[in-house]
Structure formats: C-alpha cells, structure tokens
Amino acid sequence: MLHQTMRWYGPNDIVSLMDIRQAGCAGVVTALHQIPVGEVWTTEEILKRKALIEAAGMTWTVIESLPVHEDIKKRNGNYKLYIDNYKTSLENLANCGLKVVTYNFMPILDWLRTDVAYELPDKSKALYFEFDKFMVFDLYLLKRPGAEKEYAQADLERAKNKFNEMTEAEKLYVFQNCLLGLPGSNESFTAEQILAALKTYEGIDKQQLKENLFSFLREVVPVAAANGLQMAIHPDDPPYSVLGLPRIVSNETDLSEIINCIDSPANGLCFCTGSLGARPDNDVIGMIEKFGERIHFLHLRNTKRYDNGNFFEADHLDGDTDMYEVMKKVVQLMRKRNISIPMRPDHGHQMLDDLNKTTYPGYSAIGRLKGLAELRGLEHGISKSL
Ligand code: DNO
C-alpha cells in the first residue's frame, strides 16, 4: 500500500497534526520553514520537529523541501558555502533517521497561480493558472523589461484585450497572487524584488541552469547515498518557462537527463502528476513506467487544461490525467520494487467549513482529506482486483 501522508506547514499551520491523523495519514511531510534558505538544519531543530510528529502518532516521512539557495542555482556568490551547508543538513537529517528529501530547482519562484480562489460551480475554490492573466501581470503590472519580445503577436493582442477588460481590483488580485512567496511563508515578493532577482539571472540560459543543477547533484548525491537518503526533485509548476526564466524539470527529456547525470538510486524524483500533467505533451503514465525505479515520493493531483496553457486544479480523480491508470501503474511499481512509496494528495479544494478560514492556498484540510479518501479508495480497489 502507498504510505499516505499530508503536508504540514509546522506549528503555525491551522491544520493540526491530529487533523492529518484523522484524515488517515500514517506520515507527515514537512520542513523547517523557519530556517532561512541556505542555513544548516541543526540536529536539535530536526529532532524537535520529529518529536512533535511522533507524539501525534505519525512519522516524519518526507522532507519537503530542503530548499536550494539561489546562489547554488546560479552558481555564483556564496554557492560553495551553501552546498557545504546543504551537505551538513543532509547528514543531520540522516542522523535523525529521515529518509526522503524533496527539493526543486525552479529559479526565484516556486509554483505560480494567477488565481488562488477560483470558484467552481459548487462554490468550492480551486487554484487556477490563466496564461492571459499571467501575461497581463508580466507585461502591464510587473512591466518586465523586454517581456513583449518573448510573446507571439497573437498572445500580445490577447493580453492587451484582457488588460483592458480587467477591473482595477482584478488587476491587484492577479498581481498579489503572482507575487506570493515560498510555500510555508506568509510573505510576498515585491515587484522590485522580483525585477532585481530577474536581473541576476541574465546570462543563465536553460543549458547553464542544467549544468548548475548537475554540478550540485554531483556534489550532494554521493553524500545522500552514503547516508542512506533519497533525494527527490520536484518538477516545475507550471511546467514551462515563466518570466523569461529557464525551467529545466518540465518534461520527460529533462527527467531523463537528471536521472542519467548520476546513476545512483539516491538521485530520484518527487513525481508530481499535477505539475507534469499540466502539459499536454507529457505522457504521465508512460513516465511512471520509465522512471519508476527512481520515484521516491508521489504528489497525486489532477489538472484540467484549457487552451493557451490555462489549467485549473480539478478533483483528484477528475481532470486530464487518468488517475485510475496512474494508480494502477503505481500499485504495479510498488509490487515490483516490493516497497511502499510515500504519497500525498497534493492540494485540495477549499470547501465546507474551510471556506471561512485563512489557509495556505491549496492546503486547507477538508479538500485534501477528500482527495486522499478518493485516492485511498482507488488504490484499495485496484490492489484487490490485480
Ligand atoms: C506546491 C508544492 C511545491 C513543492 C516544491 C518542492 O504546492 O508541490 O511547492 O513543495 O516545489 O520543492
């Protein structure tokens, strides 16, 4: 069976550990969000967090994320120090008995949505990425220098029409959503901060960023392997370039290159069906087959794609990714490898009582509980019938 978990943002999360346990989870996915990116995670802090989770009757199954400092992604500034710190954090995590470490290599921004409260017909709320609104943000609100050169003429026309039809309140809303900070923080970037950060990526193209990732992996994967840890890279979300930034973990070719860069079981994937599934040219089911041996953690989530790269987060069993086929492959994979892979229902709709609460976008309790229950039932049925 899958090892069922949910993400917990730590003691400040209004979703409690007991909520997570009541949802049926055996494990928790969390990170020490209070430690600034790049600093060492000390054994003391790791053990404190671990004890909290264990006192609630669960295990700390996956670290999500041990974040990678921007200097490492750019391979400049203090990157050597930050890589050393990363290695020390890995050793400390292993000494505390942890096993799976998720990270990503998205420049500046993690995941991105233009609407974090997109109302569905039943009045629940979902996350939505609308490409036209994103162009409005980029071209008219952020006013990124040179942005217009990166879009096709037809896109520019649509962005202009969209800008003209949006109210001031809608513009502000999109602006705020696109500037939301890292997961687990309540802070947002300012436009000035983003523009300044973008400048620091000038001259770093896709190939360069890939090389920087591979150099990072060549240093940290051996440390992970020696300490019995599994590294799991999370794909880009959305899985294509945004704000002119290179994105290098978006499709099958990217994943192959990453996996082949160091042939070690410690060099693995956080396989997110939601991120990868937002691209019509990604064969998500085929990718599970192809990369199965290196899948150390699963994010199960579904998206419904519209034209122009737009997508919203559908119910877990609905949307464009055939979750039945995904689950079948996963069950077969676990039997073949004779293991239980940790999974979490990634994101959920804001619904019922949660509509009156302020939660981290995508991480209210009830919608995720619903998604997890559906996925659990699906797995149960498939396991019995195979
Ligand atoms: C979004 C998450 C991502 C993920 C990181 C992993 O909800 O799946 O923010 O945690 O990209 O490093």
Image: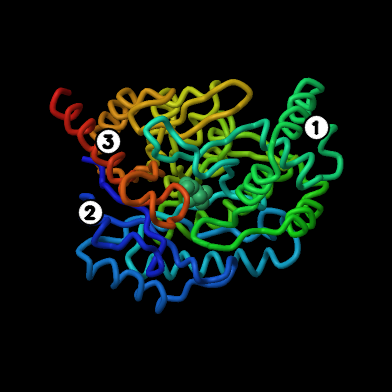
Which image quarter holds the C terminus?
top left
- The amino acid sitting under disc 3 is Leu
Residue 169 image point, x, y percent: 65, 46
Task: Name which residue lies at 52% across and 25% down.
Answer: 305
Please name the amino acid that badge 1 sits on. Answer: Glu
Q: Is residue 167 left or right of residue 187?
A: right
Indicate which disc, 2 or 1, sits on the residue closer to the N terminus. Answer: 2
Is 264 above or below relative to 78? above
202 displayed left or right of 86: right
Mark 3 crowdedness (10 Å alpha carbons): few <14, some 14-19, many ≥20: many
Q: Residues within 10 Å of mark 1 (few under 14, many from 20)?
A: few
Front tag of 2 and 3: 3
In 3D space, how far apart are the residues under numbered discs 2 and 1 (Cα atoms)? 46 Å
The circle drawn on residue 26 is 2
Residue 333 image point, x, y percent: 30, 32
Badge 3 is on which residue?
Answer: 375
User: Residue at the spot x=43%, y=33% of the render?
Assistant: 120
Quadrant location of the N terminus in the rendered image = top left
Q: Specify which label sits upstream in the sequence, 3 or 1.
A: 1
Whichever of callouts 2 and 3 sits on the residue coming sooner in the sequence is 2
Return the residue at label 1.
150
Q: Residue 40, which numbered label?
A: none
Please say whether residue 343 is visible from this viewpoint.
no
